Image (cartoon, grey):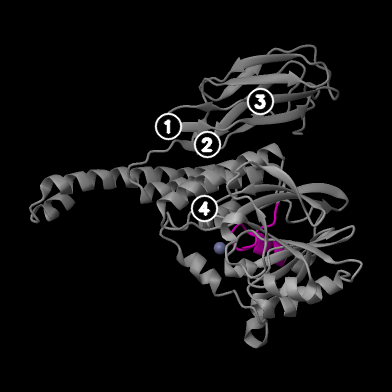
Amino acid sequence: MHIKRFHRLGCAAAVLAAAASLAVAQTQTNIHRDAATRNVGNDPFMLQYARAFYCNLADDNNQIVIASRGWNNTTGTGANAQYRIPMTQIFDDVWFVGNHYVGQYLIKTPDGLVQVDAANNANEVATFNYPAMQALGLSAAFPLKAVLLTHGHGDHDGGANWLKTNVGTEIFLGSADAAGKAYAPTAIDSTDLSMRQMSVGGKNFWILPTPGHTNGSTSSVVEVQDHGKTVRVLTNGGQSMTNSIPAVANYLDSIERTYAMVKALKVEGVMTPHIYWDGEGQKMREILASGRTNPSQHVYGHESVVRQMVIARECSAAWLTRLDATLALPVWRYNTVEFVGGAPTPTKVTAKVKNGWGPLVKQKVKFSVEETGASCTATTDAYGVASCDVRPLRPHKDRITARFEGAETADFVDLPAEATALVCSNGNCKPQ
Ligand SMILES: [Zn+2]
C-alpha cells in the first residue's frame, strides 16, 4: 500500500529501502515494547507505573509525563495545595518533601542531615524544605551536611544555591552537569562509569554515574533503616529520554549498569525524585492514608527492583531502536526459578525456570545444599522443569538453592535467577 502510494513520486528504490528500514525499526521497537510488558509478569502495579512511564516514548504516550508536569507546583497555596505532599516519613531515618511531580528525600544521620535533590527554586526550599529540616532538628550542632543532586536540571537543583547560601552545605553533582552552576558543586566524576562508595556528608553512598537523561546524571544506593532493619534503596538519577541517539544509547547503557548495581548490592527499595514514575506517589498516598507498614511501602522487594530495571532496559531499547533503525538489540528476559510444589522434599528436588515467554528449555539448573555443600546439576525439559538427585536431605534443616546462571543468544539475554527453600517433609509441604 505505502509503496504504491509513494511510487508516483518516482523514487521507487529509495522508497523501498525506506519502507524496509521502517519495517525493521517497527519490528525491533515492537519486540522491545512487547518484551517490557512480558517482563512485568503478573504485577499490575508495575504495569501501571514503571512499564507505562519508562516506555512512554516508545508507546507514543508521552502525554502521561506531560500531564504529571502540571503537578509541579512549588507554592502549595490555595488551589495549588492539592499538588503538595505533606512531609512524609517513609523510613526510620528518611522523610519525603515535595509535590506529586518531583520531591526530595531528607536523610537523618547521627550528626546531621543529607538531602537528595534540591527542589525547583529558592522559594520552594525556603517554604518547605527548610521547615522540614528544622522539624528534624536542624541546628549548628546538627547541620545540613550535604545535598546530593541526581542531575543539573532546574527541577532538581533550583533551590541548591539558596540552601548553600542560607543554610550552608556541600552540594554534590555529576561533573558533566556542573559547568556554570552558581552553587559551585563538589563534582562527582561523570566520566568514571564505575560504581564506587563515596561519603556524602558523612553518609556512605554507592555512586554510579548514569549519563543519558543528562550527561551528568548520577544514580546512587544508600542504606536506610526500616523498623530497625537495614535496607538498601536506589535513587535512579534522571528519568526520561530525549531524541538524541547518542544520549539514548548512553541511557540504555546506564540502565544496564544500574541493573548490575541493584543485583550486586541486593537493593530492596527505591527513592526516586519523580514519584509518579515508578509508583512511589501511590505508596506515599498509602502512607498518608493509613500509616507506614512494616516493611515500609517503599520496600518493593529485591526482585521487584530488579524487574523494574529490566523493564526500563527494554523500554530504552524500544526507544533507541525507533530512533536508530539500523540497530538490532538482543531482548533482556527476566527469569524466575521456583520449586515445583513450593519446596523440595527429601525425595523430590525439582524446579521450574520460566519467563514472560514461557518455560526456559534446555538450560542448566544447579541445586546446592547450603548446610552440607552437596550439589547436582540438571537440564530443563520442554516444560522448563529440572530435577536432581541430591541426598541425603534433612527435612526442616537443609536449605537448597536452585540457580540458573543465565544464557545468551543473538536474540535473547536470559538473565540469571535463583530460588532458595527449606527442605520440607514428604506429604507435609507448605510453600516457603
Ligand atoms: Zn531532568
Residue 333 tag number: 2
Residue 411 tag number: 1
Callout 1: SS: loop
Of marks 1 and 4, which one's residue comes earlier in the chain?
4
Q: Mark 1 is on which residue type?
A: Asp
Q: Which residues are magenta?
A: 270-285
Callout 2: SS: strand
Ligand number 1: quarter of image: bottom right
Q: Residue at x 49, y 69 (%)?
A: 66
Magenta stretch: includes residue 273:
yes
Of marks 2 and 1, which one's residue comes earlier in the chain?
2
Q: Nearer the viewer, mark 3 or mark 4?
A: 4
Asked whether the residues under the numbered discs 2 and 3 touch, taking CB atoms below 8 Å apart as contact, a structural biologist would say no
User: Disc 1 versus disc 4: distance between alpha carbons?
Assistant: 24 Å
Percent across and percent down for residue 228 are 88, 51
Query: Residue 373 is drawn in which quadrant?
Result: top right
User: Disc 1 versus disc 3: distance between alpha carbons?
Assistant: 22 Å
